[in-house]
Amino acid sequence: MGWKGTLRSINAMSRQMEREAKRRQRELENQRKQFEKMQELDRANYEVQVYENYIDRLQSIHKECSEVCDWSQIIQLDPPIKPKKINEHETAAQAKVDNYKPGFSDKLFKKTESKINKLMLAVENAKKDDELEYTELLYKFEKDYADWKETVEISEGIINGDIGDYLKAINMINPFEEVKDLGSSIMYNITNKNQIDVTLCVNGERIIPQEIKSLLKSGKLSVKKMPKSKFYEIYQDHVCSCILRVSRELFALLPIEMVIVTAMSDILNTQTGHMEEKPIVSVAFPRKTIESINFDMIDPSDSMTNFVHRMNFKKTNGFEAVERLKFDELKLPM
């Protein structure tokens, strides 16, 4: 695979990695067109499957991640080759001129000169076609070469621990582009070549359904108000799942050793009566610990005990504001 194909593959990593929950979601969406044709029991079963799939997706964001990016391999990719001007169309058109032999009717009706002129005009048009194709190929080459050069420069910078190139790589690869469930925005503060401080504005509580859908023994649909404890349990798992996903993606992309991810959300200020954006979870992720975890088997919120973290969570009230972690508190080597 050439350098460009490799780069495309890297950019597509996060989109290629799909949880079973996502694949199941597409299957259910494809059934939606048939929804009205279903019998009552079939519709009930369909609604419950959609509901369960949605809950599963919210709590399993951490299960997928891009492949590890090998910058030392990318730096060795060969540059694109400059195209050569072949003049293929002109050669073919000129061959028709050279091989033209007037037939009996051409001589009889004096069409020889006219046909030769047409063939010569075709040669001139062929020259223009060749020139246009070469110009397009040259433009594509120059763009590809600029992309290749930038990629190599970023790779060199990352290998040498250049913080600016870390940010360029994040923007170029954009591993969170397709992860809409993460929240509204992600901001990065790179303190040194081994550490990244991330602020993640997560989805608010409204992302969690207010009701539970299930099937009765009769096969009919049951819709009940979701208990507060269940509601906040799902929301806690969702937030922690998003935080884990962010850390995993950054470790896969960059040669860093520590990531602090702080989740921000709207919290009611009981003194003013207004909603204010505050930190609700702040976690320090060491690479070694992340690499030792089986993400397919963990409970997202329970897994926080593996890391230094701050999280004030009540089963019936949800998250309360916390102080965000800072690297200098962890007393880590720079």
Image: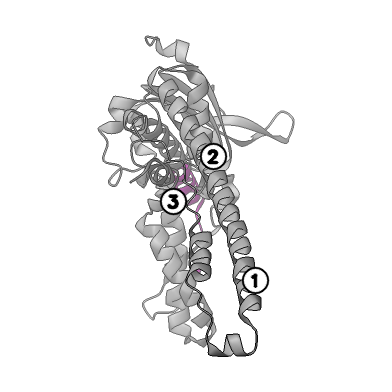
Q: Look at the picture and state if 131 lies above or below 310.
A: below
Q: Amino acid at mark 2?
A: Glu
SS at mark 1 in the image:
helix
Q: Which numbered disc flags the more N-terminal residue, 3 or 2? A: 3
Q: Position of residue 11 (x, y in %)?
A: 45, 44
Q: Nearer the viewer, residue 58 or 22?
A: 22
Q: Which residue is mark 2?
A: 142
Q: Which numbered disc flags the more N-terminal residue, 1 or 2? A: 1
Mark 1 or mark 3, which is nearer to you? Answer: 1
Residue at x-position 51% and y-position 74%? 100
Residue at x-position 45% and y-position 74%? 46
Q: Look at the picture and state if 107 lies above or below 16.
A: below
Mark 1 or mark 2, which is nearer to you? Answer: 1
Residue at x-position 51% and y-position 55%? 87
Q: Position of residue 40 (x, y in %)?
A: 48, 84
Q: Which residue is mark 3?
A: 15
- Mark 1 and mark 3: span between their CA atoms? 56 Å
Crowding near pointer 2: few (<14 within 10 Å), some, many (20+)? some
Residue range corresponding to the magenta coloring = 221-238
Q: Look at the picture and state if 218 lies above or below 22.
A: below
Q: Is there CB contact under 8 Å for labels 1 and 3?
A: no
SS at mark 3 in the image:
helix
Q: Nearer the viewer, residue 235 or 250?
A: 250
Q: Does the rendering let one see residue 39?
A: yes
Q: Which residue is mark 1?
A: 117
Crowding near pointer 3: few (<14 within 10 Å), some, many (20+)? some
Q: Is residue 223 magenta?
A: yes
Residue at x-position 53% and y-position 66%? 93
Q: Is residue 2 magenta?
A: no
